[in-house]
Amino acid sequence: MPEEGSRALYSISAVGRMVDLPVATIRTWEDRYELVVPDRNASGHRLYNRDQVEQLRFIRTQMAQGLTVADAHRLLAEQIEGGRPISAPAGLPRLLILLVEHDPYAAEYQEYFLKTEGFGVEMAFDEEAARRSFNERSPSLAVIEVLISGGSGLSLCRYFKKSGGVPIVAVSVLGCRDQAIEAGADAFLMKPLDPLRFVSTVRDLLGSSAFLQPSSGARHD
């Protein structure tokens, strides 16, 4: 089993945006069908992993195709029991990611994988630059290193969430998942980042609009 923090954990509000469902509906399904049941942190907040996000997205898609909520859950249970994969939709938009990182080498590493997937990237290396870029560029998502500017990452999470409500991925070498979620982050990843998990987390938080094809030298303007 992966260590705690090695997989992204999403708040219920983030999941609601990702799968286009009201938070109350997600809670009701959890209580009624007991199929997609998230972990809880010390404060009692629900925290979902990627598999559970895909499961809720699967239910949503099946309902859009005419199944009842009960039948959609029944089909999901059969998929899980049979070990069959749950697929996700694809598309080709270009979205801007604000990358707030104090380490230039780590920033280049993250930027490379985001751009390879077709995302636009704006980088900021201190709190002031991050706030300025956020207000001027209106990014679709922000990746925030908790230790930026001597530990101002949590304050940035609160500011970004209050100011624009964009999805936020908090990253750190510190085990501060719960503090990041409380500050407004929608997901938390421990460093060193796994490239595939990092990109998948960004895609998940942006929803179906973020399922991009690799650039392969092609333009995404």
Image: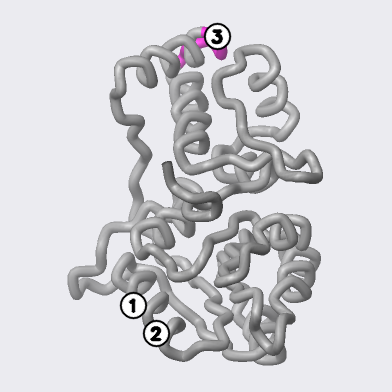
Q: Which mark lies nearer to you, 3 or 1?
A: 1
**Which of disc 2 and disc 3 is earlier in sequence?**
3
Tag shown at residue 112: 1
Highlighted range, magenta: 66-70
Query: What's the CA distance linking mark 3 and mark 2?
Result: 46 Å
- Which secondary structure, mark 2? helix
Type of secondary structure dominating the magenta stretch:
loop
Instruction: Say which amino acid is labelled 2.
Output: Glu
Q: Say few, some or many: other residues with alpha carbon within 10 Å of mark 3 (under 14 / 14 to 19 / 20 or more).
A: some
Residue 35 image offset from top left, x and y in percent:
55, 19
Give the alpha-carbon distance from disc 1 to disc 2, as whole Å: 6 Å
**Vertical comparison of 100 with 9: above or below:** below
Mark 3 touching mark 2, by CB under 8 A?
no
User: Extreme left residue here?
Assistant: 216
Secondary element at image label 1? helix
Residue tagged by mark 2?
Answer: 108
Which residue is rendered at x = 45% and y = 83% of the image? 107
